[in-house]
Each structure stands twice: as C-alpha cells, then as structure tokens.
C-alpha cells in the first residue's frame, strides 16, 4: 500500500512500484482529466504537477510519486496561477478538440508559477506539449493573457 498526496488529499493505492502514475490517477482514482497520449513522455497529454513541476505522468512511477504532491487538472483552479490560466484559456478559446488541453494548462501553470512574466523564448522552451490541432498561437495568447492578469 502506497500513500499519494493527490490534489491535497492523501490517497492509499495498491499497485506495483513501477506502475505509471498515469494509470493510478485514471484507473484507481478515477481522475480521467489526465489523458493518455503516447506512453513515452513525448506528447504531454498526461502532464501533471509533481511538487509544482510539470511532469509526464506516463513516465513517473508510483514509487517516484510517493511522498510528493501530485496536482491534476481536476484541482488546478485551486491554484491561483492555475485559475488565471484556465480563465485565459477560455477567454482566448484556446482548445479546438481539447484532448491535449489539460496537459497544456498544467504545463502553462507550472511555467507561470516559476516565471510570472516569461519571454516568448521561455514560453516556447517550456511548452513542449503537442497539439495535433495546431492551436499553438491561441495557447501562446492565453499564456500571455494569464501572465498579464498576474
């Protein structure tokens, strides 16, 4: 039995130590806002915050997440920066299909929490998530709006 702090609540889960955090979140805890995309930490659909840092949940093991704070899209609006990011995402109408957007929001929240006024180069370096619909311009505008609102 492993204890995880997920969205501010301690959860007890039973799984192999090398089980990806993504499957714990989705299958055991029912937090399906974190999406499965590629399974190899390349696309970013599964991005969550681990102690405030954006990580790919498909590549983080249960053992590596134990004892750390996990934040998922379901609780991101409890974070003041996350609330601003979501508001900017809506105002800028950033999503098209929406599949990648939870990961995009998580990555943007981590970026703005660490760097409140990022340069375009810092945004480009931090936002490595893939959007198959190509909403990168809208995402960039939403990040700029969220930074401005801070």
Image (tube, rainbow, N blue to C red):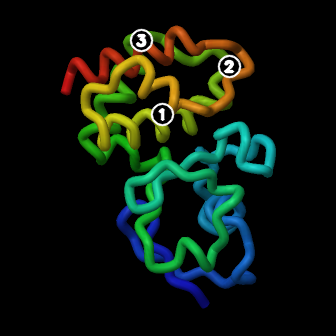
Label 2 residue SS? loop
Q: Quick check: marks 1 and 3 in contact, CB under 8 Å?
A: no
Q: Residue furthest bottom?
A: 1
Q: Nearer the viewer, residue 21 or 116?
A: 116
> Counting residues from the N terminus, which is met first, the one under dot 1 or under dot 2?
2
Q: CA distance from mark 2 to mark 3?
A: 18 Å
Residue 91: x, y in percent? Answer: 38, 12
Label 1 residue SS? helix
The residue tagged 3 is 141
Q: Which label was assigned to residue 105? A: 1
Label 1 or label 3, whichever lies nearer to me, is 3
Q: Is residue 131 above or below residue 42?
A: above
Residue 114: x, y in percent? Answer: 31, 43
> Counting residues from the N terminus, which is met first, the one under dot 2 or under dot 3?
2
Mark 3, other Cα within 10 Å: few <14 / some 14–19 / many ≥20 = some
Q: Quick check: marks 2 and 3 in contact, CB under 8 Å?
A: no
Q: Is residue 149 above or below residue 26?
A: above
Q: Residue at 67% of width from left, 23% of height from top?
A: 131
Quadrant for residue 92, please give it.
top left
Residue 88: x, y in percent? Answer: 36, 19
Residue 146: x, y in percent? Answer: 30, 23
10 horizontally vs 65: left or right: left
The residue tagged 2 is 97
Location of the N terminus by quadrant is bottom right
Quadrant for residue 67, please give it.
bottom left
Q: CA distance from mark 1 to mark 3?
A: 13 Å
139 horizontally vs 147: left or right: right
């Amino acid at each position: 039995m492993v204890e995880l702090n997920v969205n501010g609540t301690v959860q007890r889960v039973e799984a192999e130590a090398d089980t990806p955090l993504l499957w714990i979140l989705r299958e055991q805890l029912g937090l399906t806002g974190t999406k499965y995309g590629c399974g190899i930490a390349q696309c970013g659909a599964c991005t969550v915050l681990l102690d405030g840092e954006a990580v790919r949940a498909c590549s983080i093991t249960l053992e590596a997440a134990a004892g750390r704070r996990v934040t998922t899209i379901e609780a991101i609006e409890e974070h003041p920066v996350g609330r601003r990011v979501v508001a900017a995402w809506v105002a800028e109408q950033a999503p098209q299909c929406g599949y990648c957007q939870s990961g995009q929001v998580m990555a943007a929240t981590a970026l703005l929490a660490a760097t409140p006024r990022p340069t375009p180069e810092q945004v480009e370096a931090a936002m490595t998530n893939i959007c198959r619909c190509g909403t990168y311009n809208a995402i960039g505008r939403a990040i700029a709006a969220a930074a401005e609102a801070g």
